């Protein structure tokens, strides 16, 4: 699924990253627990989370995740945005819950990691 | 080549600094991305462990043509039962650590999964030394 489609479906706001690359993502994972994200063997996935802190950005960096959606109307702080930009991470904010975000994306063809 | 980083106890905003810099070096060395991911996930988990559980310590990364060796040496308090600490789900993490998205008792098992060789030595009241190696 194209990044532009993900942004449209989740009514997301882009707070960091280059969307002109229009990433094409095949799979997604939803979690607030970064330990679970770090156990995934898949990379270049979409991460949907309600955890808004610097460790989210670091986790995405180490796990080779290029697009993150902050759900539940969570906002990224300046430190997160700066670090996301440094690492070329696309950071989105959606007013939808994790359940709703995941449901919409799944229904429209984005696959689960497992 | 040798890289050294000080890790400060409780400073979560800096957890990931060492893994981030090491990742940049591994990319420059043109190591395969899947191998880089295993290495930096292991280092990041270990960094978070030192920040979350220890009184602070030092991380040393040694690069050679075959791979990378990482040593994390902390200044205590030490792990009383290493076998227990290695069990998935066992954790002594604080609420603060859990709020950061960690503390589920998955760190050490995930380090083991992502490394080719792992050794852990600990003495209560002295400290813990974690050493691991990955081949390129």
Image (tube, coloured by chain):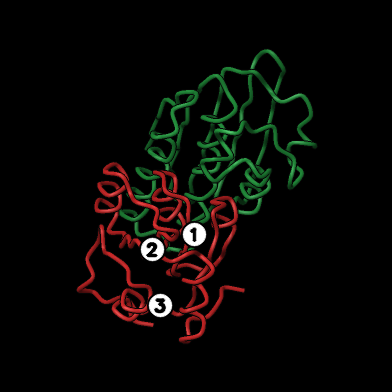
Rendered image quadrant of residue A72: bottom left
**Is there one chain holding both mark 1 and mark 2?**
no
The residue beneath circle 2 is A95
Neighbor class of circle 2 (other Cα within 10 Å; few <14, some 14-19, many 20+) is some
Locate the N terminus of chain A and report the quarter of the image it occupies.
bottom left
A82 to the left or right of A98: left
The residue beneath circle 3 is A25
Q: Colour of chain A?
A: red
Residue B96's spot in the image, x, y percent? 55, 33
Disc tally is 3
For mark 1, name the chain.
B
Tell whether label 2 touches label 3 (CB within 8 Å).
no
**Is there one chain holding both mark 3 and mark 2?**
yes
Mark seen at residue B3:
none
Q: Secondary structure at mark 2?
A: loop
Q: Give the spatial CA distance, label 1 vs label 3.
A: 22 Å
Neighbor class of circle 1 (other Cα within 10 Å; few <14, some 14-19, many 20+) is some
First of labels 3, 2 by sequence position: 3
The chain painted green is: B
Task: Choose mark 1 or mark 3, whichever is in front.
Answer: 3
Residue A84's spot in the image, x, y percent? 30, 52
Mark seen at residue B35:
1
């Amino acid at each position: 699924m194209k990044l532009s489609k993900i942004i449209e479906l989740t009514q997301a706001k882009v707070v960091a990253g280059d969307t002109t690359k229009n990433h094409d993502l095949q799979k997604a994972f939803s979690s607030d627990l970064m330990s679970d994200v770090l156990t995934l063997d898949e990379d270049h996935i979409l991460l949907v989370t309600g955890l808004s802190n610097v460790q989210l950005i670091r986790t995405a960096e180490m796990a080779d995740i290029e697009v993150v959606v902050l759900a539940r109307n969570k906002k990224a702080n300046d430190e997160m945005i700066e670090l996301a930009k440094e690492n070329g991470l696309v950071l989105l904010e959606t007013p939808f819950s994790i359940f709703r975000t995941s449901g919409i994306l799944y229904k429209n063809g984005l696959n689960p990691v497992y | 080549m040798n890289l050294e980083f000080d890790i400060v106890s409780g400073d979560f905003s800096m957890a990931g600094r060492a893994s981030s810099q090491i990742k940049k070096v591994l990319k420059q060395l043109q190591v395969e991305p899947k191998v880089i991911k295993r290495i930096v996930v292991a280092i990041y988990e270990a960094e978070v462990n030192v920040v979350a559980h220890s009184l602070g310590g030092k991380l040393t990364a040694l690069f050679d043509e075959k791979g990378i060796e990482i040593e994390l040496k902390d200044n205590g308090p030490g792990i009383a039962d290493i076998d227990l600490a290695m069990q998935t789900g066992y954790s002594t993490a604080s609420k603060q650590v859990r709020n950061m998205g960690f503390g589920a008792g998955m760190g050490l098992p995930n380090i083991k999964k992502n490394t080719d060789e792992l050794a852990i030595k600990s003495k209560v009241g002295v400290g813990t030394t974690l050493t691991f190696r990955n081949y390129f």
